[in-house]
Amino acid sequence: MIEIEVKGYADDKVFERVRRNFKLIRREYHEDTYFQHPCRNFAETDEALRIRIRKFNGHFEAFMTYKGPKIDPNSKTRREIEVPLSDPDRHVEILESLGFEEVMTIEKTREKYYVDKGILIMLDEVEGLGKFIEIEALAESEEAVGETVKILREILISLGVKKFERRSYLELILEKEGSHGEAR
């Protein structure tokens, strides 16, 4: 599956427009722990491996996600493989036993909204970075990417987004801290 994602910087006005115009699915808290491959530099290959712990409404979910290199110059579109985890601590233990190293854990609160036809908007408040808005859709093939990115960008612009961002939260935090880490 290909995740077509466009991200922009947001402020209170953008958040309020989304809250007024779209249906809230739920509020979530995320802990995203990123790992570096022992033999491949993910910063150079533009890949990512993370374990996400997601908490909402007293519920807990965990997933391991591999994100391939970005495939579109105007968005964060990537091939994504995600699997549920029943015991994330044991999965971390397996990764570390195989030589993977933890790079960083990023914490954020997320509000998830339904737009239309499988399009979702996420309002993120990322610890140490601030407010962002992401909009995403899924596609079966790369042929749909260009037109879908255009539609997603137009929706964000209509909500008041003026500046877009292709870098991941991990990349932004590492840059802010002055280290250009080895994971994406």
Image (cartoon, grey):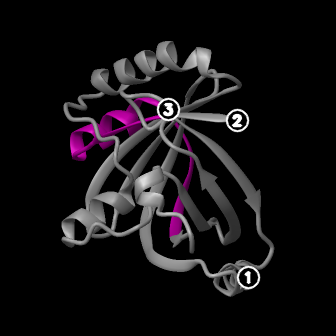
Asked whether disc 3 touches disc 1, contact meaning CB atoms under 8 Å apart, the reply is: no
Tell me where residue 2 sits by quadrant: top right
Closer to the camera, 59 or 83? 83
Q: Is residue 74 left or right of residue 89?
A: left
Find disc 3 in the rendering and name its residue.
Answer: 71
What element does badge 3 sit on?
loop
Tell me where residue 25 sits by quadrant: top right
In space, the residues marked 3 and 1 are separated at their CA atoms by: 30 Å
Q: Give the class, few, some or many, for how many residues have Cα within 10 Å of label 3's Cα (few <14, many ≥20).
A: some
As drawn, 8 above or below 155: below
Amino acid carrying mark 1 in the image = Ile
Residue found at x 35% / y 18% = 154
Closer to the camera, 167 or 84? 167
Marks 1 and 2, the one that precedes in the sequence: 2
Closer to the camera, 176 or 113? 176
* Rendered location of residue 13, percent (x, y): 22, 39
Amino acid carrying mark 2 in the image = Met
In space, the residues marked 1 and 2 are separated at their CA atoms by: 25 Å
The mark lying in front, picked from 2 and 3, is: 3
Find disc 1 in the rendering and name its residue.
Answer: 94
Amino acid carrying mark 3 in the image = Ile
In space, the residues marked 2 and 3 are separated at their CA atoms by: 13 Å
Residue found at x 71% / y 78% = 88
Please provide the residue range marked out in magenta.
Answer: 5-32
* Rendered location of residue 122, percent (x, y): 46, 44
Extreme right residue here?
86
Residue found at x 23% / y 29% = 160
